[in-house]
Amino acid sequence: MSSDRDEIQIITFYEFKALNDLPSLKVRLLGAMTDLSILGTIIIADEGFNATISGKPADVGRFVSAAGAILGTKLVFKSSFHSADPFRRRFVKVKPEIVTLRQSVEPTLGEGTRVTPGDWNKIITSDDVYVLDTRNDYEFQAGTFDGAVNPGTAKFSELPEFVARNLDPKRHKRVAMFCTGGIRCEKFAPYLKGLGFEEVFQLDGGILRYLEEVSADESLWRGECFVFDERISVDENLEKGSAEDTSAAFKSK
């Protein structure tokens, strides 16, 4: 939640959509970031875009309009506020994927798998639902949902191997998954459907939207949510948390 002292707005946004002429898009997006004093990172690929950026609220509002026009869409974003800018530089990166899974996925298989934050508690408290945290170990350690399974990964592309070792479509009929803002689940839900898992659920908008929409007395979230900027984590009010950054130590193992 914002307060009088919070001067910087941080937003995350992504979309899976076909993009063309990535070098030109990079130049235009970086130009818009520079003109509007926006910091952070935008990743673009043939499959779409993924970003976390920050700036003064008025500048962020103008950037949302400008970037939407450049990308040919209306940006849907999640927002939080902080008293200092969590980024020091601005980047637009062209990559093979906007979130790296290194697996072939048919996006249309994800249709019908999204669950609203308001319905999420009912899903994950069902006895026959396997609740999978699709994030990495250091993210899980900062906080997670009651009863969620930690896959113990250091990067998202390791998750298919975890599933191959531990899950079976014949035994795990119903699988619910979540991530920070939703993008990893947008890829992994159709991936699981492609493997033959019968019912797959993904938390629409991820943990950040859940924390925004579900009241504290009803929340099944425990701890803080790891974020990939200088805040390290946010608490249940989407304000800077107190978690330590253990990602480097875990990745070095």
Image: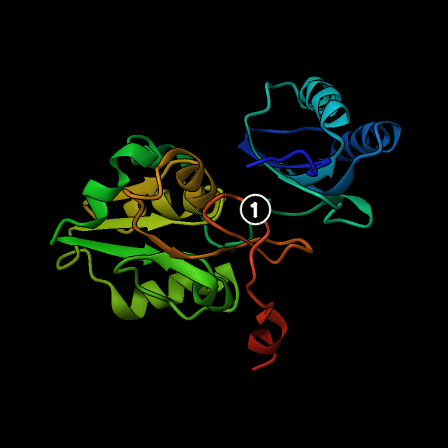
* Total tally of numbered discs in the picture: 1
Q: Quadrant of residue 4?
A: top right
Amino acid at the residue labelled 1: Glu
Name the residue tied to disc 1: 239
| Residue 105 visible in the current orientation | no
Q: Is residue 196 left or right of residue 212?
A: left
Who is closer to the viewer here, 242 or 144?
A: 242
Residue 97 percent location from the top left of the image = 59, 46
* Residue found at the very far bottom of the displayed protein: 253
Residue at the location (28% across, 58% down)?
Answer: 146
Residue at the location (44% across, 36% down)?
Answer: 212
Who is closer to the viewer here, 231 or 42?
A: 231
Residue at the location (25% across, 60% down)?
Answer: 147
Q: Is residue 30 left or right of residue 134?
A: right
Q: Quadrant of residue 63?
A: top right
Residue at the location (47% across, 42% down)?
Answer: 208
Element assignment for label 1: loop
Residue 141 percent location from the top left of the image = 45, 67
With respect to residue 249, does 6 lie above or below? above
| Residue 137 visible in the current orientation | yes
With respect to residue 64, does 138 lie above or below? below
With respect to residue 212, does 166 lie above or below? below
Who is closer to the viewer here, 229 or 2?
A: 2
Residue 36 percent location from the top left of the image = 83, 28
Q: Is residue 246 left or right of residue 22?
A: left
Q: Quadrant of residue 213?
A: top left
